[in-house]
Every structure is written in structure tokens, then in C-alpha cells.
Amino acid sequence: MANTSQTPASQADATRVARSNDIIICEGVKKWFGDFQALHGITTSVREGEVVVVFGPSGSGKSTFIRTLNRLEEHDEGTIIIDGVELNNDLRNLEKVRSEVGMVFQQFNLFPHLTVRRNITLALSHVRHFRKAEANETAERLLERVGIPEQIDKYPAQLSGGQQQRVAIARALAMQPKIMLFDEPTSALDPEMIKEVLDVITQLAQSGMTMIVITHEMGFAREVADRFLFFDEGLIVEEGTPQHFFENPQEERTKLFLSQIL
């Protein structure tokens, strides 16, 4: 069993062993929704440049966990530190963390009334204060990177689901994040569109981007992940390398889940 609710002593131990290149540090993170406890004390860390795949059954706390990392969900107990900045009620800390963490959701969350170009350049203009030419150049470069430069002046409704998700990835990358979070980025796609999105994420992984990816696409996960985290009932039940999970998982709950999806 990798992680359970943490005592103060174990939190201190986790801090002491945290490596200097840990860009994400979580200690005893808990989250409630009313009477329901979604996270039961998550302690883990992610190294700079590491790709971590999170998987587990529906309702296991996966999405809640990664949403706490940019405070889309506020954690109730524990400590979250992103690139040396603690996530707390200090708005300056929140703004700094959000400027460094990009997120791609299951649904594409594009503005339907804006072109692809404007979807990408909007935040660059209003948040980063890029000049129009600079923002346009960034949009063109990122669409080239995700393989759809010809779609720049179309509207989201004119694109396939896979193309929309690639625009969403480009939009997140435009803010030059140090960390990318992916919440089941292919779950809303038709099967034939999944590969084109996974190929883009694979390229990002190979470029050295720090990433946490929630996915059940286990072939892809095995290819890109440095480490797996298996979640169930708000806990990390088991963690290890892809080889560990595919060849020698230890926990019975992990074995049962893998037998159902592989």
C-alpha cells in the first residue's frame, strides 16, 4: 500500500526525502465534498521532467487530485507545493502557480464563438500582454507543433473532436507552462481520433515536459510514463514503474482493475 492518511511525523519524513528537483510536492492532501471524502491523504511528489500516469476506477479521486494542483478544487487539509510555491489562500501564490500549470480537460472547453487563432491568442493578449503579431506568431507555431496549422482561422464546430483537443493542448502550451495536467484527454473522442491526440502528448513527453496524465489508454501510458499511480477510494493504492504494473503488481485491488482493462 503506497499511501494512506499521513501522520505529522510521516509528513515531516516526506519533506525531508523530497528531492531538490521535485517540482510538485503533496503531503497529506485531503478533500471533502460535504460529507463525502474524495481524497484521504495523498502524499506523493513529481520530479521536474517526469511523466506520471494516474489511473483507477471512476470516482477514485483521480480528477479531484489533479484539480487541486492548480486549485480548481481547494484542498481542505495537507500541503501542496508547486515549483517551490505553496498553494494556499494567498492570491499571489495562486496566480504564480496557475501561470506555470497548464491543463487539458476531457471536454475541450474551447470558446465556440472564437476562431482557433483567437482561442489561443486571447489569454496571451490579456494575461501575458503579448502584442498582436507576437500572439499570432505563437498561435501559428503551436498549431504547427500539434499538427493542424491549416485550421487556424476555423471555428471549433468546424473541427473534429481530435482537432479540437489538439487546439486545447496548443492553447495550454501558449502560456509556457512548466507542468501540464491531462484529465482523460481522449475519453470524449471517437476511437479513430484518439491516436492523433496521444501522438501530440507523446511528443510533449519526449520533449521533457513535466506531466501528470489521467488515462486508461494503457499502451500509450506504458510508452510515455516514468511512473504510474493507481488510485482507488481517494488513496494511492500502489505506485511504481510501468514494468512493475504490467509484470508484477502487488496489491489485489490493482491486479483486479488491470485484469478488467487490459
Image: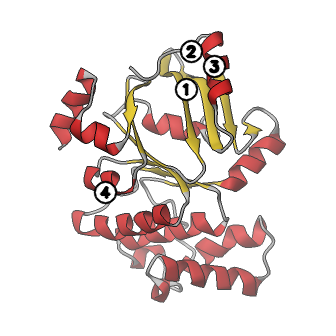
Locate residue 143, reporting x and y percent. 52, 79
Give me the C-alpha separation between circle 3 and circle 1: 11 Å
Instruction: Return the residue at label 2.
Output: 6
State the residue at coordinates (27%, 49%): 218
Give me the C-alpha separation between circle 1 and circle 2: 7 Å
Amino acid on which the number 3 mark rests in the picture: Asp
Instruction: Return the residue at label 4.
Output: 220
Seen from the viewer's position, the closer of residues 246 and 28 is 246
Give me the C-alpha separation between circle 2 and circle 3: 10 Å
Amino acid on which the number 1 mark rests in the picture: Thr
Check disc 4: other Cα within 10 Å, few if <14, some if 14-19, many if 20+: some
Left or right of 66? Residue 203 is left
State the residue at coordinates (44%, 31%): 61
Choose mark 3 or mark 4, whichever is in front.
3
Give me the C-alpha separation between circle 3 and circle 4: 34 Å
Locate residue 21, reporting x and y percent. 65, 45
Work out whether mark 2 precedes mark 4 in sequence or the reverse, and give the earlier one.
2
Amino acid on which the number 2 mark rests in the picture: Gln
